[in-house]
Image: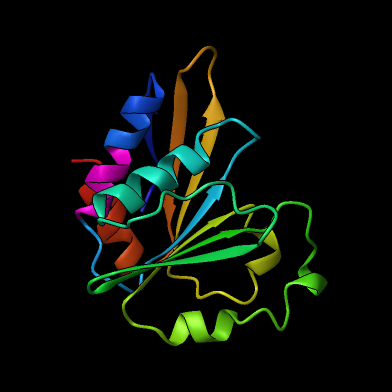
Amino acid sequence: MKEKILYTSSPQQTQELARRFASLLHGGEIVFLRGPIGAGKTVFVKGVAEALGMKSSPTSASFSLMKRYQKGKHTLYHIDLFRLTEGEVFNLGFEEMLEDETAVILAEWPDPLAQMMPQDRLEMDFVLEGGDKRRIMLRAGGAVSRALAEGLCK
């Protein structure tokens, strides 16, 4: 799949995009969220969690590395590996996450995980365009993530 690009002009539009995204989830999806601090990655995660009916609202997971949210058939893992290196992420329980077929994995600052995760993942790069405007570039690495990206771009 070629790279696809979406734009949002406010945090509310980013959350609306996240709600549309959540409606496409079945479990087993992996999403890498990249971008500078303040680009909207956590806003997007909050929108997904709310749309899935999670009781607590995700905050930046930077200080806890990984947070797990459960609601009905959905398990949402919010991972934030800000400031970590590849060598520091081993033995943190990612294997269990990958075995959970109901899990949706949203990883901020994901590069230390890249070699541990399947290639079939959606990579979303959030780029600041000035003010509240964001350019969100999507790259899919396989069939599951390609369907997700195509659904989001309809």
Screen quadrant of the C terminus: top left
In the displayed structure image, the side of residue 126 where residue 92 appears, left or right: right
Prevailing SS of the magenta stretch: helix
Residue located at (30% from left, 48% from top): 50
Q: Where does residue 45 sit, x and y in percent of width and height?
A: 43, 48
Q: Nearer the viewer, residue 6 or 18?
A: 18
Q: Where does residue 77 sit, x and y in percent of width and height?
A: 47, 66
Q: Where does residue 92 sit, x and y in percent of width and height?
A: 67, 78
Screen quadrant of the N terminus: bottom left
15 lies above or below 80? above
Q: Is residue 3 visible?
A: no
Residue located at (39% from left, 20% from top): 10
- What's drawn in magenta, residue-wise? 17-23
Residue located at (22% from left, 44% from top): 20
5 lies above or below 142? above
Q: Nearer the viewer, residue 118 or 50?
A: 50
